[in-house]
Image: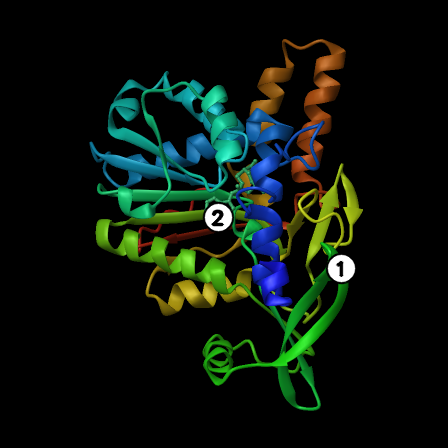
Amino acid sequence: MIKQKKILPIDKFIDIALYDKNYGYYSKNNPLGKNGDFVTAPLISPLFSEMIFIWVISYWIKIGKPNKFSFVELGPGDGSFCKTFCRILKRFSEFEKSIKIYLFEKSEKLIGTQKKNIKSKNVVWIKNLNEIKNGPILFFGNEFFDSIPIKQFIFKKKQLYEKYIELDKGKFKKFHLKKTSIKIKKELDSLDLIKKFKLIEYPKMGLEILKKLIKKVKKYKGGILFIDYGYLQSKGIDTLQSVMSHKKNKYFNNIGKADITYLVNFQLLKKFIESNSLFLNEIVEQSFFLKKMGISERAEILSRKMTFKEKSDLYYRLERLLSEKKMGSLFKVLFANSENLKFNLGFK
Ligand SMILES: C[S@@+](CC[C@H](N)C(=O)[O-])C[C@H]1O[C@@H](n2cnc3c(N)ncnc32)[C@H](O)[C@@H]1O
């Protein structure tokens, strides 16, 4: 593909680097965990998934305990979140009878890992969101949006250019700039992305998926809960980043061997969701959300029966989730709903 096209727009390049069926990063590796390249909140501590479980069951109660409730996890990674979720679910028989859990995953390799980790009659795997035919639906994605490729644009002498990458024999050669089409320029304009900044990041593929989620929750009623790292105010900087074995990597190096992500523009998601007439809670930081959900109290209860070593480990993990310098502030929580539910558990 790279040979045929010679140069590729950034999003196409990332898509191949991460998801190509034979050579893509997510198709070959299990990137998560100590032996992988990075860890996510469900792997840091099951307390994170417990808090989300409490939030989801509370949401189900709030919408009147519907006896058919679809819960969709977007990009479940190695299945850690869903494994904890299903373990707790067993204790809530009424909820267990109502819920159907859909796992929406692109990587065959990760589907294999998830199937090994999750054994529950409530869970099905889907490749297409149209396979969900029952509502209300709640979509949940932790670090999902940041794994969907983005486009980048650069302003030069009042002209807008899209950034392309050229590879030679699979290695980075140089970047190219191509004049942006009127169609794309209009899209950027409609999202209010063309500002004074020199660099613009546009999650075109991500917004296409989000649009599908919005359509679903409008049709069947329901909501979208996203947790991801990102910002509320754009600074117009290049946020593309890559990690390999828990260390920084230039995203155009080690293609297929390293993860590539970016910082999510929550202001843009807010605007997009509101312009599609969903109701949005005020976006909060992960530490605010988890504390409101009672994570510290839960840790305190668990720690009572723990040895000193176990306690230290528990609080070390809690600190990673909550600390401002770690995931606490950088990660944001967004909740949108088809109706004005006034459901502010975990929010302001
Ligand atoms: C960074 S991992 C997050 C894993 C997990 N949610 C966690 O918190 O541990 C991103 C996940 O999203 C999946 N993914 C990315 N793009 C996708 C898409 N378009 N459709 C379905 N899954 C996708 C990846 O394969 C992977 O499972």
What residue is shown with label 1? 172
Query: Between 95 and 84, which is closer to the camera in this rendering?
Result: 84
Residue displayed at 70% across by 49% down = 255
Q: Secondary structure at mark 1?
A: strand
Residue 289 visible from this viewpoint? yes
- The percent position of residue 266, horizontal first and vertical second, equals 54, 60
Q: Earlier in the sequence, mark 1 or mark 2?
A: 1
Q: Which quadrant of the figure has residue 37?
A: top right
Q: CA distance from mark 1 to mark 2?
A: 33 Å
Residue displayed at 69% across by 37% down = 38
Amino acid on which the number 1 mark rests in the picture = Phe
In the image, residue 129 above or below residue 113: below
- The percent position of residue 29, horizontal first and vertical second, equals 62, 34
Q: Quadrant of the N terminus?
A: bottom right
What residue is shown with label 2? 226
The number of callouts visible is: 2
Amino acid on which the number 2 mark rests in the picture = Phe
- The percent position of residue 292, horizontal first and vertical second, equals 53, 39
In the current view of this chain or complex, which residue is farthest to the bottom?
A: 157
Q: Secondary structure at mark 2?
A: strand
- The percent position of residue 236, horizontal first and vertical second, equals 67, 71
Residue displayed at 46% across by 68% down = 271
Residue 50 visible from this viewpoint? no
In the image, residue 130 above or below residue 114: below
Query: Between 316 and 158, which is closer to the camera in this rendering?
Result: 158
Q: Nearer the viewer, mark 1 or mark 2?
A: 1
Q: Residues within 10 Å of mark 1 (few under 14, many from 20)?
A: some
Residue 293 shows which numbered tag?
none
In the image, residue 325 above or below residue 97: below
